Image (cartoon, rainbow, N blue to C red):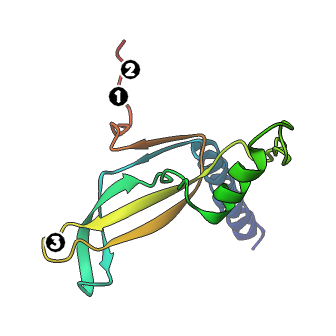
Amino acid sequence: MLLLNRAITATWIKIVTVVFFSSRAGIALASMVNAPKTHRTFCKKCGKHQPHKVTQYKKGKDSLYAQGKRHYDRKQSGYGGQTKPIFRKTAKTTKKIVLRLECVEPNCRSKRMLAVKRCKHFELGGEKKRKGQVIQF
């Protein structure tokens, strides 16, 4: 009974150790993300899984004719310097990555966004890491 109990405890310790190290490794690898250029996922318009073309979402150019921009430009014009406070206390060092998925079906071409967690470096369609390969310089 005592021997069996020790064996179970030893096995449990091994399992806990493996989980602990794998979770630590997951945290360490979150700084670099490499996403494939194609992603097979559900398309709402087609109603089934389809291959999607993946691109990184970028913010569009601000319109000069938006109401807030017109007010700001009017207030800034003339003498008097900067009229509104410029925010400088940024809290985050990274931005959330957003992927733009476009269905490759010729009749569909529907687009949707997919948010990814924060990461320092993001790469789209980069070279995959191979296990046990020699690094060449």
Number of marks: 3
The residue lying toward the viewer, choosing from 119 and 22, is 119
Image x and y of residue 82, in percent: 83, 39
The residue tagged 2 is: 135
Q: Is residue 56 left or right of residue 82?
A: left
Please rate how many residues cluster around mark 3, counting C-alpha atoms within 10 Å: few if below 14, some from 14 to 19, many from 20.
Answer: few
Q: Amino acid at mark 1?
A: Gln
Q: Secondary structure at mark 2?
A: loop
Looking at the image, residue 127 sits to the left or right of residue 87; the answer is left
Q: Amino acid at mark 3?
A: Glu
Residue at 85% over, 45% down: 83
Residue drawn where x is 69% and y is 67% of the image: 8
Q: Position of residue 10 (x, y in %)?
A: 70, 58
In the image, residue 103 sits, relative to residue 92, either above or below, namely below
**Of callouts 1 and 3, which one flags the residue occurring earlier in the amino acid sequence?**
3
Comparing labels 2 and 3, the label whose residue is closer to the camera: 3
Please state which of residues 98 and 134 is positioned toward the viewer in this rendering.
98
Query: Residue 58 in the image: x percent, y percent?
Result: 47, 51
Say which residue label 1 marks.
Answer: 133
Name which residue type carries label 2.
Ile
Secondary structure under badge 1?
loop
The image quadrant of residue 89 is top right
* Cα gap from disc 1 to disc 2, whole angstroms: 6 Å
- The residue where tag 3 is placed is 105
Mark 1–mark 3 Cα distance, whole angstroms, equals 37 Å
Helix, strand or loop at disc 3?
A: loop
N-terminal of the pair, mark 2 or mark 3, is 3
